[in-house]
Image: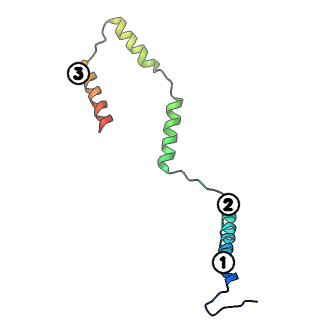
Amino acid sequence: MKIYTLVGMSEAQQAAAPRQKRLQNEEREAQSAQRGDQVSVSSAGKLSAIAMRSALDAPDVRTAKVQSLQHDIQAGTYRIDSEEIAQKLLEADLELYS
């Protein structure tokens, strides 16, 4: 039986209203928890994972490059291009600070 005052709800109903809302919220949260969480990965994230896997699978030493350099050094034909080294250092520096 509901007893209304002239203004609307009785004091007992007004006191029970926050509790009912809290119970409804708890019930909604329990239902959403039962559905489980979902995770989705963007295509950029998938590409990043593939790149990381490829980098980790790659050998630490490029054997063919090392053998080529060893041969050039032993033959006396290896030349250091200081301008190229300076250019690469500047490019790396600009990339870091821009």
Separation (CA) of disc 1 from disc 3: 79 Å
Q: Residue furthest left?
A: 83
Separation (CA) of disc 1 from disc 2: 24 Å
Q: Secondary structure at mark 3?
A: helix
Q: Please say if 66 is above or below 91.
A: above
Where is residue 11? Give x, y as percent.
67, 83
Looking at numbered disc 3 in the image, what kind of residue is underneath it?
Answer: Glu
Q: Quadrant of residue 96?
A: top left
Which of discs 1 and 3 lies nearer the camera? The answer is 1
Of the two numbered discs 1 and 3 on the same chain, state the one appearing first in sequence. Answer: 1
Looking at numbered disc 1 in the image, what kind of residue is underneath it?
Answer: Ala
Residue at numbered disc 3: 83
Where is residue 76? Give x, y as percent.
31, 6
Where is residue 40? Give x, y as percent.
56, 53
Residue drawn at (50%, 51%), measured in percent from left and top? 42
Residue at numbered disc 1: 17
Q: Please say if 73 is above or below 89.
A: above
Separation (CA) of disc 3 from disc 2: 62 Å
Label 1: how many residues lie within 10 Å, few (<14), some (14-19) or many (20+)?
few
Q: Residue furthest right?
A: 1
Residue at numbered disc 2: 33
Q: Secondary structure at mark 1?
A: helix
Q: Is residue 28 left or right of residue 70?
A: right
